[in-house]
Structure formats: C-alpha cells, structure tokens
C-alpha cells in the first residue's frame, strides 16, 4: 500500500482493508472485483490484484502462511531482494541485512570505496557489493534496530539532494561528510495522458465508476468514456480504447464486445 501512496492515506485505509480481508486466505478466496472494491481510495489499483495473486500462491504452496526465509520469499512473484529481506527482518526477526535506496546511499557515503565502488554522493541503489557490505557490517542480533536506524538516517539526514552532515551522528567517522554536492533534481518526463491529465488518473476514474456500479453489472464504453472525461469527443476514441485494453491486460476490467458496442465491468473471478 505504501508504494506510491502517502502514509496518512494508508493509515486510514489499512485497517479497513484488513477488516475486510483479515487473512491471506480470505483475500485469496475473494472475487477480484471485491478486492478491487476494497482498495477504494488507494489508487494504482493493479497493486491489489498483485497482492491477491500473491495470496493465492501462498494459499496453494504455503498453506496460507507467508514464508519466513529470504530464499522462500524471493520465489514469490513481485517480491524482490529488498522486500524479501525487509519482510524476513521486520516481520520475522531474521538476522539479515536490508538495502533500500536510503540505506544504499548511506553505505555508499560511509564506505565510498567499499560498497559498490561508487563515488561519494552516489544515490544508485545497491548492487551485489552493497549487499555484501551490508551483511558484513550487520551487528549480531541487532538487525531490526540497525536496519531501521540506517533507513531513518537516509530518510532524514543523509538525504539524496541535501545531506545535513552538521546534524549527523556519524559526521566524525564519515569520509563523505560535508563533501557531497547538493544535487539538482533531474527534470522528470511528462506522463502520458490527455488534455494535461495523466492516464493513471483516467485509469483510476474508470475503476471508480465500475466500483460504483455496486454489482449492477456493466456499463457501455461510450457512457464510461463520458463519465471519466466530460469533454470526451470522437477523436479521443482510439486513446480511450487503448486505455481500456491496457486495463483489461492488467486484469482490472472485463470487456465484453457486442455488435452494439463494448460493455465494461470489474473482473468477476
Ligand atoms: S556525515 Fe553526511 S554524508 Fe556522512 S552519513 Fe552523515 S549525512 Fe551522510
């Protein structure tokens, strides 16, 4: 939930979602349309489908319980090295290192010639050398506190663009202290969209309209188009069809094609 969504919003939604799906088994056995409805207000709706896919695999192969070891977690779809180590450490107390962007940056600055062999100030997420370094310096039986502390340091003081070395408890040990250039933010590429509104906003609106059908079936694609883009015109047709096709490919909508047109609904599976 926290990927791309603000903590304040997740804090409201997480308990509601957990009440609806208190176990992975419940989520695995739910209809996708119910899972999508329960995700209301969170945006980036394909995250809930991926979560449900994960829950189904865990039910099938791990008797409905999330595995605890990094190697098992790594075999699950959508779980990369960072998530596997973070879950093993923070949920199950395993003594393993964690490397996210913040931690990689802190390590690169503290050990500029050791963990990834990058220059001080690099913000590139850790490669194999960074993971190896993170494992080597992990204090015995303190993985939880250590990993949390490094993350906090990277998020609050040793930030990417303007590290606050004067406040940092490591400044007397750190070879990069007061040497990191204050990076300029790179210009971001504009998102694809229509009339200045990004496609992801239209995707969210489409799913929201379908949620509000409340099980009353489907809606015609032309009515749907006008609901999500009030100034919808014939020339938008190709763009809108592509939007729907992508949503169908992601499993978020179901399209049924008739001679009279296309009907759209949430997936019923
Ligand atoms: S002294 Fe500066 S560069 Fe070094 S860890 Fe602290 S904030 Fe980061």
Image (cartoon, rainbow, N blue to C red):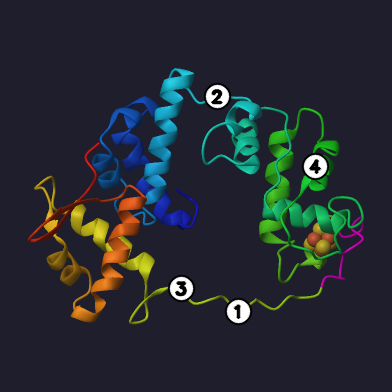
Name, please, the residue furthest toward the front: 259
Residue ID for mark 3: 191
Q: CA distance from mark 2 to mark 4?
A: 23 Å
How crowded is the residue under tag 4: few (<14 C-alpha within 10 Å), some, or many (20+)? many
In the image: residue 247, left or right of residue 188: left
Can you tell which of label 4 and label 1 is closer to the viewer? Answer: 1
| Helix, strand or loop status at disc 4 | helix
Mark 2, ligand 1, within 8 Å: the answer is no
Task: From the top left corner, tell me how far across and down residue 51 is, in percent.
Answer: 42, 39
Question: Quick check: marks 3 and 2 in contact, CB under 8 Å?
Answer: no
Q: CA distance from mark 3 to mark 1?
A: 12 Å
Can residue 64 be seen?
Answer: no
| Helix, strand or loop status at disc 1 | loop
How crowded is the residue under tag 2: few (<14 C-alpha within 10 Å), some, or many (20+)? some
Residue ID for mark 4: 134
Residue ID for mark 1: 187
Q: Which badge, 3 or 4, is on the more N-terminal residue?
A: 4
How crowded is the residue under tag 1: few (<14 C-alpha within 10 Å), some, or many (20+)? few
Residue ID for mark 2: 67
The quadrant of the picture showing ligand 1 is: bottom right
Residue appearing at x 71%, y 64% in the figure? 159
Q: Which badge, 1 or 2, is on the more N-terminal residue?
A: 2
| Helix, strand or loop status at disc 3 | loop
Is residue 137 positioned above or below 119 on the image?
above
**What quarter of the picture does the C terminus occupy?**
top left
Q: Which residues are magenta?
A: 171-180
Mark 4, ligand 1, within 8 Å: the answer is no
């Amino acid at each position: 939930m926290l990927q791309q969504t603000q903590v304040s919003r997740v804090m409201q939604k997480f308990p509601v979602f957990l009440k609806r799906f208190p176990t992975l088994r419940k989520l695995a056995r739910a209809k996708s349309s119910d899972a999508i409805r329960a995700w209301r207000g969170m945006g980036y709706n394909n995250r809930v489908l991926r979560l449900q896919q994960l829950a189904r695999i865990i039910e099938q192969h791990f008797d409905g319980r999330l595995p605890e070891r990094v190697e098992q977690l790594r075999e699950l779809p959508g779980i990369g090295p960072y998530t596997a180590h973070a879950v093993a450490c923070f949920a199950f107390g395993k003594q393993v290192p964690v490397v996210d962007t913040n931690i990689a940056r802190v390590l690169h600055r503290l050990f500029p010639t050791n963990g990834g062999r990058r220059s001080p100030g690099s913000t590139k997420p850790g490669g194999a050398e960074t993971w190896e370094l993170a494992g080597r310096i992990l204090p015995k039986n303190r993985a939880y506190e250590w990993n949390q502390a490094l993350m906090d340091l990277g998020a609050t003081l040793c930030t990417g663009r303007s590290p606050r070395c004067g406040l940092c408890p490591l400044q007397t040990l750190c070879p990069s202290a007061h040497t990191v250039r204050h990076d300029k933010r790179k210009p971001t590429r504009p998102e694809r969209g229509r009339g200045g509104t990004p496609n992801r906003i239209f995707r969210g609106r489409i799913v929201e309209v379908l949620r509000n059908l409340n099980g009353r079936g489907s809606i015609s694609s032309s009515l749907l188009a006008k609901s999500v883009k009030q100034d919808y015109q014939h020339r938008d047709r190709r763009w809108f069809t592509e939007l729907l096709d992508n949503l169908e490919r992601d499993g978020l909508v179901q399209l049924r094609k008739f001679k009279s047109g296309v009907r759209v609904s949430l997936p019923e599976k």
